[in-house]
Amino acid sequence: MKKLWSWIKHKHDYVQVGFREAEDAHERYSIRKYECQSCKKVKWIDGRLDDYYKRK
């Protein structure tokens, strides 16, 4: 139970590890790939709405 609780309370440490391009109505933008350094969870985030990238 203690291990489950620590997993639920885990604070992710995301780092950008890649990206890909997409196009919408003749507008190009990137979709960024972030990976948590401790649990290896992956997130794909639209570059137009990316809060992680703007914080750095």
Image (cartoon, grey):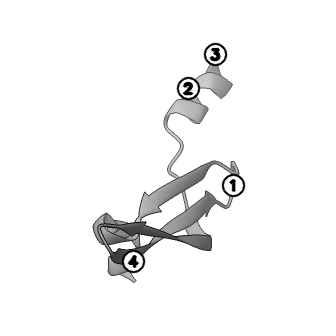
* Mark 4 vs mark 1, CA separation in Å: 32 Å
Q: Quadrant of the C terminus?
A: bottom left
Residue for badge 4: 28
Could you tell me which secondary element the residue under label 2 belongs to? helix
Q: Is residue 44 above or below residue 17?
A: above
Task: Please state the horizontal and vertical placement of residue 55, each as a whole percent of the image.
Answer: 34, 78
Residue for badge 2: 5
Q: Is residue 42 left or right of residue 29?
A: right
Could you tell me which secondary element the residue under label 4 belongs to? strand
- Residue at 62%, 57% in the rendered image: 36
* Mark 2 vs mark 3, CA separation in Å: 6 Å
Question: Which of pointers 3 and 4 lies earlier in the amino acid sequence?
Answer: 3
Q: Nearer the viewer, mark 4 or mark 1?
A: 4
Could you tell me which secondary element the residue under label 3 belongs to? loop
Question: Which of pointers 1 and 3 lies earlier in the amino acid sequence?
Answer: 3
Q: Is residue 32 above or below residue 44?
A: below
Q: Is there CB contact under 8 Å for labels 2 and 3?
A: yes
Task: Please state the horizontal and vertical placement of residue 13, each as a whole percent of the image.
Answer: 55, 61
Question: Which of pointers 4 and 2 lies earlier in the amino acid sequence?
Answer: 2
Badge number at residue 38: 1
Question: Which of pointers 2 and 1 lies earlier in the amino acid sequence?
Answer: 2
* Mark 2 vs mark 1, CA separation in Å: 16 Å
Relative depth, front residue between 38 and 30: 30
* Mark 1 vs mark 3, CA separation in Å: 20 Å
Residue type pointed to by label 3: Met
Q: Nearer the viewer, mark 2 or mark 1?
A: 1
Q: Residues within 10 Å of mark 4 (few under 14, many from 20)?
A: few
Badge number at residue 1: 3
Relative depth, front residue between 9 and 16: 16
Q: Is residue 32 left or right of residue 46?
A: right
Farthest residue in the top direction?
1
- Residue at 54%, 53% in the rendered image: 43
